[in-house]
Amino acid sequence: MSTLSTQPGAVEATSDAVTPRHTPTPLSPEESAELARSAGLSELGVRPPRRHYLREIWDFRHLVWHLSSAQAYATNQNNHLGQLWAVINPLLLVGSYYLIFGVLLETRGGTDNYIAFLTVGIFVFGYSASAVIAGARAVTSNIGLVRALRFPRAILPMSVTLTQLFVNLPAFAVLLIMIPLTGEPFSWHWLLFGPALLLQTVINLGMAFFLARVVNAARDTANLVPVGIRLARYVSGVFFSITHYAGHGIVSMLLLYQPFAVTLTIAREALLEQYPLTWSSWAAAGLWALVLGAGGLVFFWRGEGRYGSD
């Protein structure tokens, strides 16, 4: 047995006490990934499979509801009149648009009840405008949340669209009160206003999906969205009858069956006696809802791994 110490106070050790230490072999990248998957972890910045993505959205459905309700409540809470502004703003627009377009420019041609026609146009288009503008910034305006937490990013356009629906519900309630006050009779068609809003909501969501990914990739395009909405306001028949002023040719058909205009048409068919139900308008709205809703979700899902990475 040998002694290792030669200085006073030094720690003595024997050769029998010195044993080699075992260094663990590090896991390979494949083994590490398999271990993470077995523990229920997922890799960041990677697009999940489509079916798994849909399951994740369903699992986070409660988050959509809580985000939407909280954001809707916070929209006007700093104003003295609070949520009343959701009703006051469109009513002010009805008054100003009636003076400008109904009185000064006389765009009342082709309408029997212009006030009801204009009121439906402003309230319904206002919902689409706010949902699309807010939906375009759904990812970029929540970039801190995107970078901090792991969740399907499609939750953000969905919650923004639902928020705008909640914000506009008081306005739609006032709309249903105003319509009979303008002389419109009650009809069973009024029951179709709910399905019309549902189709409009899916259309708005589809456009939000498309624009949210585009704006996330090129932030400057967010400035073009309000310009596009302003253009859509003037060509979608909000304050004039498209068939009366554009005729029945190809231009009129293109204007009538674009997504913003067709939502106005089905809402007017549900609430106004002058506009009978037409299968073509509802079929076009259903087709837009399917194409934009499903196509927008797929388009947004394809960019899932890049949100928040810039």
Image (cartoon, helix red, strand yellow):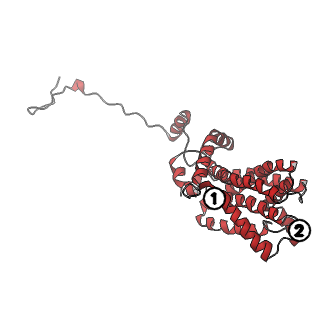
Residue 279: mark: none
* Outermost residue toward the left in this view: 8
Q: For mark 1, does the 10 Å Cα neighbourhood hold few (<14), some (14 to 19), or many (20 or more) residues?
A: some
Judging depth in this view, the residue of 169 and 302 nearest the camera is 169
**Residue at point 23%, 23% (across, down):** 16
> Residue 169, position in %: x, y?
70, 51
Judging depth in this view, the residue of 77 and 307 nearest the camera is 77
Residue 85: mark: 1
> Residue 6, position in %: x, y?
10, 32
Q: Secondary structure at mark 1?
A: helix
Relative height, residue 89 to residue 47 (above, below): below
Quadrant containing the N terminus is top left
Determine which quarter of the picture holds residue 118.
bottom right
Residue, disc 2: 110
Alpha carbon distance from label 1 to label 2: 31 Å
Q: Tell me which label, 1 or 2, sits earlier in the chain.
A: 1
Q: For mark 2, does the 10 Å Cα neighbourhood hold few (<14), some (14 to 19), or many (20 or more) residues?
A: some
Tell me the amino acid under the disc marked 2. Answer: Gly
**Residue at point 73%, 59% (across, down):** 123
Relative height, residue 282 to residue 108 (above, below): above
**Residue at point 50%, 48% (across, down):** 148
Tell me the amino acid under the disc marked 1. Answer: Trp
Judging depth in this view, the residue of 89 and 47 nearest the camera is 89
Determine which quarter of the picture holds residue 76.
bottom right
Left or right: residue 9 compared with residue 165: left
> Residue 308, position in %: x, y?
55, 54
Q: Secondary structure at mark 2?
A: loop
> Residue 309, position in %: x, y?
54, 55
Left or right: residue 187 compared with residue 25: right
Of badges 1 and 2, nearer the viewer stands 1
